[in-house]
Amino acid sequence: MSDKKLTASVLIITYKRAKYLRNALDSLCKQTVKPDEVIIVLKPSNDGSEKVIMEFVDKLVVKLLIQKGVGAIDAYSQGINYASCDVILFLDDDAIAEADWVKKYVCIFNENPRVGGITGLTIDTEIINNTIKIKGEQFYEDYAEGFHRQPLEILNGYFEYFSTSGLFGASRKLMESNKEIIKSISFGGLNMGFRRFLIKDFPLKILYKGSKKAFWFEKHLALNVVVKGYDAIKVRERKKSPIVYHTLGVDSLTRSKGFWHEFWLNYDRAMNYWRIKMYGLKCSFIKYIIGQIIISRKKFLPRFSAFLYTFFLGFYYYLKYRKLVRHYFVSINN
């Protein structure tokens, strides 16, 4: 364990969330260990977000960036590369961090030098008359196994993982496990943290070229940590876990409906096979095809259309960008 006190950046991406942003920033003011800087990447929307942010410039070390480019990937890339502290903690603009949130992240990183990424628990809530009403712990993923959902070799031993088909998988043993800490890449942008040097300059824009939803980008940040020889973990024990309270009923990129929503979500699922191949990791083309056919049984038209769209486009992106992505990992490891 290092005696060095780790510094912490908090990164918030916000757009049209002035109503909720105040609660998120207020929760950072109430931390038992204050973040060393709070980086806010704002896409202007004329909803009063700038005014809300200005309320906190005397309470927090706020660094406001106006988003360059379009989309979540551009915003996150800009914020990550602007951060200057040892660790970067991610908080959604509609989430509220518990009082020990920063302290827990810093302590876990400090006590576990081979851990490169951490995610904690998220509690679904409703805010009624400025009172937080807890609804229960949040679970995003199905515990899916099967022929087409076997873990990548580098993720053997992980409870939640990317599979050789490009789809996400999770061991059913997780349901029976009472481990307080598990190896997992099931990270979410509303509550996660990384050692900055492991994700700085990571080529998210290349991997997510053409994406509208940025679906699973957090898992790629975690996979990148593992490829570099560090562990990605999920802390599930409430007393130890960094906890955030997430507001229900708020629209987001991945919580919408309709044909194009499903199309662009499955674009990211189908493109994931090609992204993993860009790393140089071993995938299965047969399992990729089978996995996409299986996943398209529900909401067939948008999902299968997205699969066909990415079939050739993904191969083109793979040929065009694989050398750039692999060069990134070679240069880092050297």
Image (cartoon, rainbow, N blue to C red):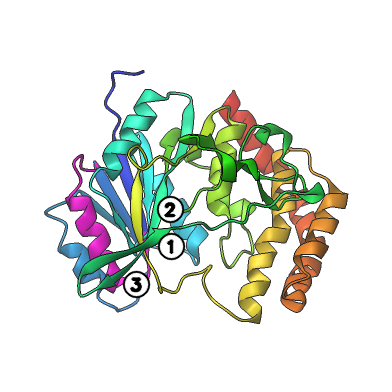
Considering every residue shown, the one lying at the far front of the view is 176
Considering every residue shown, the one lying at the far left of the view is 58
Name which of mark 3 and mark 1 comes first in the sequence.
3
Q: At x 39% / y 50%, what residue is drawn? A: 90
Residue 190 percent coordinates (x, y): 41, 55
Name which of mark 3 and mark 2 comes first in the sequence.
3
Q: Quadrant of the C terminus?
A: top right
| Residue identifier under label 3 | 44
Secondary structure of residue under mark 2: helix
Q: Is residue 145 left or right of residue 80?
A: right
Q: At x 24% / y 41%, what residue is drawn? A: 36
Vertical relation: 191 (above or below) 181: below
Out of 167 and 194, give the one closest to the viewer: 167
Three-letter amino acid code of the residue under disc 2: Gln
Secondary structure of residue under mark 3: loop
The magenta stretch spans which residues? 13-35
Name which of mark 2 and mark 1 comes first in the sequence.
1
Alpha-carbon distance for marks 3 and 1? 11 Å
Vertical relation: 29 (above or below) 110: below
The residue carrying pointer 1 sits among few (fewer than 14), some (14 to 19) or many (20 or more) residues within 10 Å by Cα, namely few
| Residue identifier under label 1 | 68
Three-letter amino acid code of the residue under disc 3: Pro
The residue carrying pointer 2 sits among few (fewer than 14), some (14 to 19) or many (20 or more) residues within 10 Å by Cα, namely some
Q: At x 61% / y 40%, what residue is drawn? A: 159
| Residue identifier under label 2 | 78
Q: Hey, which quadrant is residue 106 in on the image?
A: top left
Out of 53 and 31, give the one closest to the viewer: 31
Secondary structure of residue under mark 1: loop
In the rendered structure, does residue 292 fall within the stretch colored magenta? no
Considering every residue shown, the one lying at the far right of the view is 286
Q: Quadrant of the N terminus?
A: top left
Alpha-carbon distance for marks 2 and 1? 8 Å
